[in-house]
Image (tube, rainbow, N blue to C red):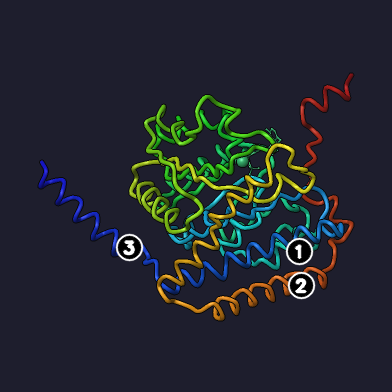
Amino acid sequence: MHTIKKYFFLIFATYFEITMKEFSKEVYLKWYEEMTMWRRFEDKCRSLYLKQKIRGFLHLYNGQEAIPAGFTHAMDLSKDSMITAYRCHIHPMAMGVDPKRIMAELCGKATGTSQGMGGSMHIFSKEHRFYGGHGIVGGQIPLGAGIAFGDKYFDRKAVNICFMGDGAVRQGALHETFNMAMNWKLPVVFVCENNGYAMGTSVKRTANHEDIYKLGLGYEMPCLPVDAMDPEKVAEAAYEAIERARRGDGPTFIEARTYRYRGHSMSDAEPYRSKDEVAQYKLEDPIEIVKQRIFDNNWATQEELDALEEKSREFVEECVEFMENSPYPDANLLYDYVYSTPDYPFINKLENN
Ligand SMILES: Cc1ncc(C[n+]2csc(CCOP(=O)(O)OP(=O)(O)O)c2C)c(N)n1
Ligand SMILES: [Mg+2]
């Protein structure tokens, strides 16, 4: 038995090495450039919001960057898809959506990903298989399973990565979805981005234990926690889950343990946590982890990393310039994409009364 196990492990290890992209110098430098750009992008959004160029809601992603970095390393971007909640500017960028168009969308410009009509919580790109951007907490969980159902039905060998916050896991929709996803062995990876808080409510206050990943156990779904401040650890967990789904063995539930540096949204005064707590988490900053590994391997000097950061800064300025030079949508478009069903029975009944 022992030898058989070893034999299977060897086959698995060989397969793993052949298919999993290496954590090379190029990957780390790409992560550094992308992650610094993502953070600058969010910081820029904050200042655009204060100038009222971005209106409505704005949820920033600072601190959580290792998650999309790690997942997109493990995904097959030519066919896999993603869906998430409203904290959704960075996931589509990691999938390849043009950040300039995301910036334009945030400011309601016609060149935005949804022609300026979706806004901050509804970034979407069919072309890149990024399916939103959802404001109803947990609403995307059954949708992610639905995308995976389509992938299985049409034998696309594709996997959906369905992200959610820690606040979403107490929704009934998660349990219904977990049950059916396991029953039908759907190619989906459920990821709870546990950043410690749902608005101002700490995970500690919402359940009698904090191990969110254990919610998978009731459905015999493979489940695990991962240190989501480190993109390499995220990528390893993601790869195993994605390949399990791709070979037809069904879903995995990953609890990605992370932290958000900014408030829930721009209107959050953060009375529920101390500055010391935030400072403590910043000691494990994902960008610093990437930087340290680059230095440990002598892959770049401080000057070279400064140059990459400068490139990120300039690129974010280009995004703003693109947005500023873009027109607002034509006012007549207000009547487009609005559904009207004159023969809808409920409306008829009202009118008849
Ligand atoms: C069904 C539903 N209930 C309540 C809300 C209000 N609401 C918006 S965000 C949020 C907290 C969600 O927190 P979490 O899932 O942890 O995501 P995070 O903001 O931390 O990324 C709540 C309760 C909502 N949008 N939808
Ligand atoms: Mg949360």
Is the Cβ of the residue at disc 1 closer than 8 Å to that at disc 2? Answer: yes
User: How many neighbours does mark 1 have within 10 angstroms: few (below 14), some (14-19), or many (20 or more)?
Assistant: many
Residue 104's tag is: 1
- Residue pushed farthest top? 353
- Measure the alpha-carbon separation of dots 3 and 2: 38 Å
Which quadrant of the figure has residue 165?
Answer: top right
Q: Residues within 10 Å of mark 2 (few under 14, many from 20)?
A: some
Closer to us: 343 or 92: 92
The image shows residue 33 at horizontal and vertical percentages of 57, 71
Q: Secondary structure at mark 1?
A: helix
Residue 268 occupies which quadrant of the picture? top right
Q: Dot 2 lies on which element?
A: helix
Q: Relative to 206, is 200 above or below?
A: below
Q: Residue at x 48, y 61 (%)?
A: 77
Task: Please give the residue where the numbered disc 2 appears in the rendered image.
Answer: 322
**For marks 1 and 2 on the same chain, the one whose residue lies earlier in the sequence:** 1
Q: Amino acid at mark 3?
A: Thr
Measured along the vertical axis of the image, is residue 211 above or below residue 8? Answer: above
**Residue 187 appears left or right of 176:** left
Query: Residue 19 got which mark?
Result: 3
Residue placed at 57% from the left, 31% from the top? 204
Q: How many marks on residues?
A: 3
Label 3: state its secondary structure. helix
